[in-house]
Structure formats: structure tokens, C-alpha cells
Amino acid sequence: MRNTWYVAQRELGAIFVQPIAYIFTIVLIGITGLIFSGQIAAIAFTPGAPVSLTNVLGLFTFLFIFAGPAITMRLLSEEQRSGTMELLMTLPLRDGEVVVGKFLAAFIFYLAAVGLTLIFPIILLNFGNPDIGPMITGYLGVLLWGAAILAIGLLASALTDNQMVAFILALGLNLLLYLAFIPAEFFGDNPTIALIFQELGAQQHLGSFFRGILVAKDIVYFVMITAVFLFAATRVMESRRWRG
């Protein structure tokens, strides 16, 4: 655990001085803030209008499909490009500790970004009487989704020493995960296959959180995606060590 935290601290210092991570985060918060402002205006001019963070959090998760790869694209690819990966591998660190440490650093940065959005529920609580349940479960969904996106990006970064390639690869995987429900529409005559595609898509699972519904399978879905991609990134690291 100490080694993992050492890697996380080392990486946090690098992430927090990365301009591109800040740019994507500012754009992310700015766009969601604009949508939220429009919702607040609707509440002010239309008494009785529904008070909810569903649209804002839904937009936040969609935009993080693009922002997530910007945070993760350099985590392992830059180590390979600069040659510091070889130095890192000479330290008494396991590959899993390196991967989890990098992931923790990215997730802490993500938590900071999500923390900036907490102003939204605070404002809603002052403007009206929103249902707190969906807010809590919605933010839980946002955190689980962010963990999955970062794990995917970490695998993409492990596969190449080119940051742009890592970004595009992670973005493609994220979109596949988010839009996996679309093929289900073409299998209307085969409910089993349609259900498989629906369950593979992240939108259906996120929707439950945003509606204030906690279902075990939705939590397991995101935890499994995170675990599988972190495991895959670790195996890529191990294979590179053996090749070296």
C-alpha cells in the first residue's frame, strides 16, 4: 500500500501541473454550469418547475467521455516515451502497484473536479425542496462512471507510447461503452441478444442512479469494468517487463 501511495503522490504532482487536464476540466465544469444556470432560470420564472440534477449529471458523465482520456493519456505512455518506465521498473514496485497508484492519482483529480459541482446541489437546496435521494445516488453513479473511464484510459495509455494514440483509443472505447445499447434496437426479434447489448451499455446503468434507484447489478457493472481494465493494464505492464 505504501508503494501504491508513493506512485499516486508522484503522479498527482504531475497531473496538477498539466495544462490540458485543467483545460478539459474547466470546459467540463463550464458547460455543465451553463446548463445548470438555465435550469435555475426556469425554476425562477416557472414556479413549480421540477428541481433535479439529472440533466446536469447526465451531461457531466457524457462530457467526461472526452475529458477522461485527456487526464489518463500520459499516465503510462509518457513514461514509455521518455524512458522513465525502465527506471520505474527498476524500483521495488510491483506492476499492480504502479497501475493502481496511477489510477488513484487520476481518480483524486477527478474527485476534485466532481467536488466543484457540489455547488449545484447546494444552490438547488436553497432554491427549492429537491429530492435528496436521487442527488446522492446520482453522484455515486458519477463516481463509479469516472472510475471506469479512468481505468479504460489507463489501459489505453499502457498500450502505446504516443499520447494522442492513447487519447483516441480511450475515447473510442469510452464511446463503445456508452453507446453499446444502440445495437439492441436491431435485435428486436431476439430479446436475449437485445438484452445483452442493453446491459453492456453504460447509459442504462447510469440511468438507475440518476433516478435515485440503487441496484446491485449497476454497481457491480461499473466495479467490474474498472477492475477488468486495471487488471488488463497490469498485464500489459508485466508483458513489457518480460520483453525488456
Image (cartoon, rainbow, N blue to C red):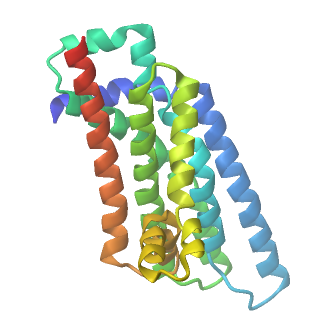
Farthest residue to the front: give it.
189
Q: Position of residue 47 (x, y in %)?
A: 79, 89
Residue positioned 21% across, 28% down in the render: 95
Q: Position of residue 226 (x, y in %)?
A: 34, 51
Residue positioned 60% across, 65% down in the render: 58
Residue positioned 59% across, 65% down in the render: 57
Asked if residue 68 can be seen in this view, the reply is no
Q: Is residue 226 above or below residue 170?
A: below
For the residue pair 141 and 152, the one nearer the viewer reads as 152
Residue 66 horizontal side relative to residue 162, left or right:
right
For the residue pair 208 and 34, the one nearer the viewer reads as 208
Asked if residue 59 can be seen in this view, the reply is yes
Residue positioned 44% across, 30% down in the render: 157
**Quadrant of image for the C terminus:** top left
Which quadrant of the structure image shows residue 235?
top left
Q: Is residue 47 above or below residue 176?
A: below
Residue 165 horizontal side relative to residue 219, left or right:
right
**Quadrant of image for the N terminus:** top left
For the residue pair 136 and 163, the one nearer the viewer reads as 163
Q: Position of residue 162 (x, y in %)?
A: 52, 20
Q: Is residue 184 above or below residue 202?
A: below
Q: What number of labels is visible? A: 0
Q: Position of residue 231 (x, y in %)?
A: 26, 42
Farthest residue to the bottom: give it.
48
For the residue pair 124 and 198, the one nearer the viewer reads as 198
Q: Is residue 61 above or below residue 236?
A: below
